[in-house]
Amino acid sequence: SESKVQFNHVLSIYPGNEWASDYLKKVMLTSSPYLKISGAYNSDTQPFSNLGGGLEAGIYKSNLLSPKISLLYQNYDSSGMKRNSYATTLSNKIFFSDIGTDLNLGAGIVQPLGDTGLNWTASIEITKRLFKNMNFSVSAERKNYQYTLSNFHRAILHNDVSACLSYS
């Protein structure tokens, strides 16, 4: 990226410049590909338990291209009745740095518990930086819901719309 080139140029002229070195490390870290592996076990009183795992990989290429892919597998058990669920999502985050806004778009497929077919999922989130530590975001998402026993018999997909004001 352009910032890597510029920081390397500064460091070629001023090799001991800690500020440039620190920012180059931050740029390298932010733009490095990543792989995240997750796992979880949940149990509650329905009786209902699930064991699952996921993989997520992504990379920052530019303000317009920051793709991510995620794969999720979950195994559910209710009194000996077992079901599996699979999901794949592909998303891209676009950074509009000049106006302090990010756009995150996602789409995927899911094979829910109570269904043998595939269903689609989608998401959109817009985040606007209001001040240094304050953001406002709005999002809409069609997603799979599988946290009740009724999911063993039919797929439940629902739409969520939300707005959030955050301070960090």
Image (cartoon, grey):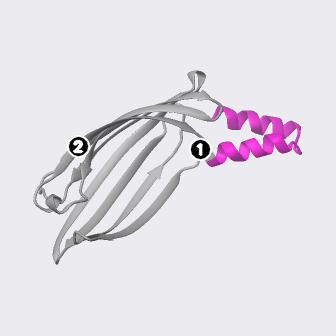
Q: Could you tell me residue 24's position as x and y percent?
A: 73, 43
Residue 57 in the image: above or below residue 53: above
Q: Which residue lies furthest to the front in this view?
A: 45
**Residue 13 in magenta?**
yes
Q: Name the residue under label 2.
A: 158
Quadrant of the rendering where the N terminus is positioned: top right
Q: Which residue lies furthest to the top in this view?
A: 99
Crowd tier of the residue under label 2, counting other residues whose Cα lies within 10 Å: few below 14, some 14–19, many 20 or above: few
Image point 22% across, 72% down: which residue? 47
Q: Could you tell me residue 123's position as x and y percent?
A: 34, 38
Quadrant of the rendering where the C terminus is positioned: top right
SS for callout 1: loop
Looking at marks 1 and 2 on the same chain, the residue that comes earlier in the sequence is marked by 1
Dot 2 amino acid type: His
- Which label was assigned to residue 31? 1
- The tally of labels here is 2
**Residue 165 in magenta?**
no
Residue 35 in the image: above or below residue 167: below
Q: Could you tell me residue 15's position as x and y percent?
A: 87, 44
Residue 154 in the image: above or below residue 4: below
Magenta part, dominant SS: helix
Magenta highlight range: 1-29
Dot 1 amino acid type: Ser
Image point 22% across, 68% down: which residue? 46
Q: Is residue 51 left or right of residue 115?
A: right
Say which of 74 and 64 sits in front. 74
Image point 45% across, 63% down: which residue? 37
Q: Do the residues labelled 1 and 2 touch (CB within 8 Å)?
A: no
Say which of 23 and 5 sits in front. 23
